[in-house]
Every structure is written in C-alpha cells, then in structure tokens.
Image (spheres, rainbow, N blue to C red):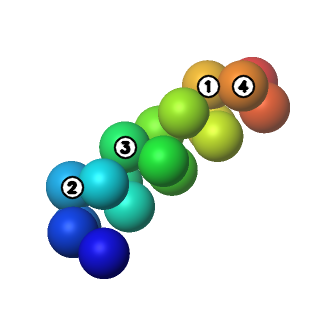
Amino acid sequence: MPYYCQFGEYIRFSSSYS
C-alpha cells in the first residue's frame, strides 16, 4: 500500500472522528 494512501486514510479517519 502506498504511503500517501495510508496517510490520506488517517486524515479521513481523524476528520470523521473529530
């Protein structure tokens, strides 16, 4: 899995959680 893909997933999760 690409790094940018994993990073984007983290951002999306954080945004959804916030």
Point 62% across, 37% down: residue = 14
Q: State how far apart marks 2 and 4 are (Cα).
A: 18 Å
Identify which residue, 16 or 5, lies in the foreground: 5
| Amino acid on which the number 4 mark rests in the picture | Ser
Q: How many badges with numbers are in the image?
A: 4
Classed neighbour count for the residue bearing mark 2: other residues with Cα under 10 Å, few (<14), some (14–19), many (≥20):
few
Q: Is residue 16 left or right of residue 8?
A: right
- Give, as a three-letter code, the residue at label 1: Ser
Q: Position of residue 16 (x, y in %)?
A: 72, 25
The residue located at (22%, 68%) in the rendering is 3
Q: CA distance from mark 4 to mark 3?
A: 12 Å
Circles 1 and 2, Cβ within 8 Å, touching? The answer is: no
- Amino acid at dot 2: Tyr
Q: Type of residue at label 3?
A: Gly
Secondary element at tag 4: helix
Residue bearing the label numbered 1 = 15
What mark, if any, has residue 16 been given in the picture? 4
**Element type where label 1 sits in the image:** helix
Quarter of the picture containing the C terminus is top right
Cβ–Cβ below 8 Å for labels 3 and 1? no
Distance of mark 3 from mark 1, alpha carbons?
10 Å
Choose the circle earlier in sequence order: 1 or 2.
2
Residue 8 in the figure: left or right of residue 11: left
x and y percent of residue 4 in the render?
21, 55
- Residue corresponding to mark 2: 4
Q: Quadrant of residue 6?
A: bottom left
